Image: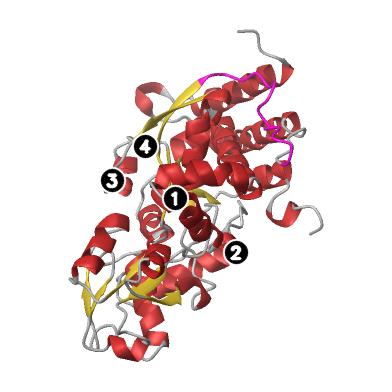
Amino acid sequence: MLMNKTARVLISLLSVVSLAACGSGTNGQETGSQNEQKPAATAAAATAGAAAASSLAEAGAKADIQKGIPPWEGREQPEVTITAGFAKGMTGIANQFAVDKGWYEDAGIHLNFVDTANPVAAFGAGEVDIADGDPGTYIPAIVNGVKIKVVSNMWRSRGAYWIIAKPEIKSFADLKGKNVGSAQPIGGMALTLMDVLSQNGVDPKKDVKLVPNGFYQSAYATFESGEVDATIIHQPFATLTEQEGKGNILAKTWEFMPEYQTGVLVASEKLIDEQPDVVHRVLEVYFYANEYAKTHLDEFIPWAAEYLNLDEATARKAIESEIELWENDPIVDVNRLQVTEDLLTEYGMQREKISVDGTVENRFAEAVAKELKLGKYKTGQ
């Protein structure tokens, strides 16, 4: 396939990165001159990556989400294959829409999907290139030497969690002495539940029994069966609880924890260093899809209803109930990340306080936000 000028520039830049990484003395020992060149090589790699992202953003500047013109349209680029661990259900719904529409393929990105219970171990084993998830899982891993970086927010950075309860439970005070589903023993959802309970006068360690009851349908099944009297859960199950008369919504947790960061995308340092253009291209598709879905609900909701196995009215109600969280701002606020880490320590989910310094690489998010006019670059902001 013939490549246009932009694609040739990208390949040249990536060749600079690759060549800069090669160079060792006899028997693997670096010579003095090579050792002196090492910081320069690192700087060259970072400069090349920034230039690659800039070239892609420039080539995709014609993108118009409202008109359905994606940044990759008409732009020739190398075909790549990467392994991704992307969320499903409501957490990853618009990204799954992109997969179904074939937008990653259109952008020259072939995805091998991995569904792993331990994404950190998978990254450590080199089995995953990019994934989304809870920073409370990834940040400690980065600090402890796993070669990954946070590269953007997800479509939302506040927790899209709800607390539902049986019909007779009308307030948080009514939860005392009850079994409450926490999703996991530790992690973002359990932490969120504990903090919201604490803010509402319920001691999560003394006043209730926390039950790790899983996610989505699994969590809802424990609620329906009476195994738990209340639970933290995702949509569409909060909407179904009310519609089916099975209980009450006690809380939208983000109203109690506006500074708590829950959703990020992370990439391996290998992908960042060797194929920075690919990181940029993945984020382009991810955020184009999310903003397109949000601004084309009449097209998106019928697809979402089928994906979630719901009628369209229920799907619309569930999706629109979280529209305020659907920020589509790629750029990570490291101050909010630090709030998250501090809370994990406060609730005993980490042994000691962790600094988020050095865990985030925002240059790709910055370029995509500017290119797609999102976040601080949104028209009128």
Mark 2 or mark 3: which comes first in sequence?
3
Give percent across and percent down for residue 355: 46, 66
Mark 1 or mark 2: which comes first in sequence?
1
Which amino acid lies under the numbered mark 4 shown in the image of this protein?
Val
Q: Secondary structure at mark 1?
A: loop
Q: Secondary structure at mark 4?
A: loop
Q: Residue at x 29, y 77 (%)?
A: 166
How far apart marks 1 and 2 lie (CA) works out to: 22 Å
Q: Are marks 2 and 4 in contact (CB under 8 Å)?
A: no
Q: Residue at x 69, y 50 (%)?
A: 374
Residue farthest toward the top in the current orientation of the protein: 1
Q: Is residue 75 magenta?
A: yes
Q: Nearer the viewer, mark 2 or mark 4?
A: 2
Which amino acid lies under the numbered mark 3 shown in the image of this protein?
Ala
Q: Nearer the viewer, mark 2 or mark 3?
A: 2
**What residue sits right under mark 3 in the picture?**
121
**What residue sits right under mark 1 in the picture?**
311
| Left or right: residue 237 compared with residue 69 | left
Mark 4 or mark 1: which comes first in sequence?
4
**What residue sits right under mark 4 in the picture?**
128
Residue interval drawn in magenta: 66-79
Mark 3 or mark 4: which comes first in sequence?
3
Q: Nearer the viewer, mark 1 or mark 3?
A: 1
Which amino acid lies under the numbered mark 1 shown in the image of this protein?
Asp
Give percent across and percent down for residue 126: 33, 35
Observer-nearest of 295 and 16 = 295
Q: Nearer the viewer, mark 1 or mark 2?
A: 1
How far apart marks 1 and 3 lie (CA) works out to: 38 Å
Res. 318 in view: yes
Mark 2 or mark 4: which comes first in sequence?
4
Disc ID at residue 324: 2
